[in-house]
Amino acid sequence: MGKKKKSENEPNIEEKITDVEEQKTDEYEGLTDAEKLLLAKEERFLDKEEEEEEPEEEEETTLGNVKKSIGFFIDYYKWFVIIPAIIIVITIIMITSYLSESRERALELSIVNAKFEIPDLMYAVENDFIDYTGENITGDDIRIVYDLQYPDTSSGSEAFSTAENISMQKFNASVIAGRVDIALTESWVVNDYSVTNATLDLRELFDEDFLKDHEDKVYYARDASGEKIPVAFYIDAKIVKDAYPDDAKPLAVSFDSSKHREEARRFMEWLLSQSE
């Protein structure tokens, strides 16, 4: 076969080289040797930059492949990752909650049969009471349980709702476990626990002079033997009365199972000091 005939319009390589050389000659014309050297260095530097651009493109391509791989992994294995993560988070929350609930407190207060809106009382307990004691404790050292309902037992248990029965059992379990140092409640609750000797005789907390000074506020209830003993104080402090229905007569009572009797005594003193 014969050679392919060269197209008239096809660029001639030799002519291109000649044109480039002539162009460089024109650029260098009239320059000193030093300027020619500097210009040549600049051209070499520009050529080098063009060569370095290619690896960057390769790096971008590699990064894109990595991102695609990660996206595929997350999309395909997401439930294998998300479900264990959720389990771990829930476990941590449960452990943290358990440790918070089970840790020793300076005082544990149960507010029984109060309204659910009691921010003023809770603020006073967590701030004013601490100032009164002068001890190095914070609001976190006081545990307050306020969602407790204990209906009048004289009406008969058949009249109690399921929620009331659960609330009574919760309160009873806390008393038995020694987790109630002070309870703000009503007379029938105090009577129910006094008759089983579960309430704490105020004579174990206060001296005779203190009880005589506050005789008009002392509440007596019968113990298991039928003897009437001082077991609680009527509390007419505004912060407490506002937390209860208008016809209620709230009492402050402590229990024989209390682990913080000294704090219980101080709390009763503080409540009486707030009396109207």
Image (cartoon, rainbow, N blue to C red):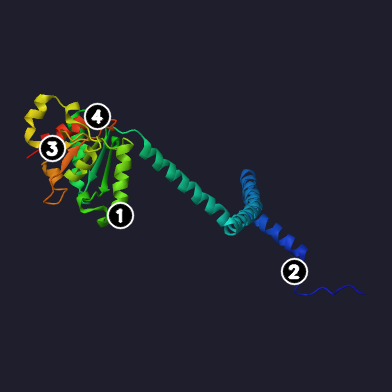
Asked which quadrant contains residue 225, the reply is top left
* Residue 247 coordinates in the image, percent (x, y): 11, 51
Q: Nearer the viewer, mark 1 or mark 3?
A: 3
Q: Quadrant where the N terminus lies?
A: bottom right
| Disc 1 residue type (three-letter) | Ala
Upstream in the sequence, badge 4 or badge 2? 2
Q: Residue at x 32, y 46 (%)?
A: 169
Q: Amino acid at mark 3?
A: Tyr
Vertical side of 239 occupied by 268: above or below: above
Q: Where residue 163 is drawn, which disc sits there?
A: 1
Disc 1 on helix, strand or loop?
Answer: helix
Distance Cα–Cα, label 2 vs label 3: 117 Å
Side of 24 relative to 209 (left or right):
right
Separation (CA) of disc 4 from disc 2: 106 Å
Nearest to N terminus: mark 2 or mark 3: 2
Residue that carries the numbered disc 3 in the rendered image: 219
Q: CA distance from mark 1 to mark 2?
A: 97 Å
Q: CB of mark 1 within 8 Å of CB of mark 2? A: no
Farthest-out residue, front: 225
**Mark nearer the N terminus (4 vs 3):** 3
Q: Between tags 1 and 2, which lies in front? A: 1
Q: Which three-letter amino acid code belongs to the residue tagged 4?
A: Arg
Q: Nearer the viewer, residue 218 or 14?
A: 218
What's the residue type where badge 2 is placed? Answer: Pro
Q: Residue at x 20, y 35 (%)?
A: 223
- Provide the residue designation for mark 2: 11
Nearest the eye: 266 or 71:
266
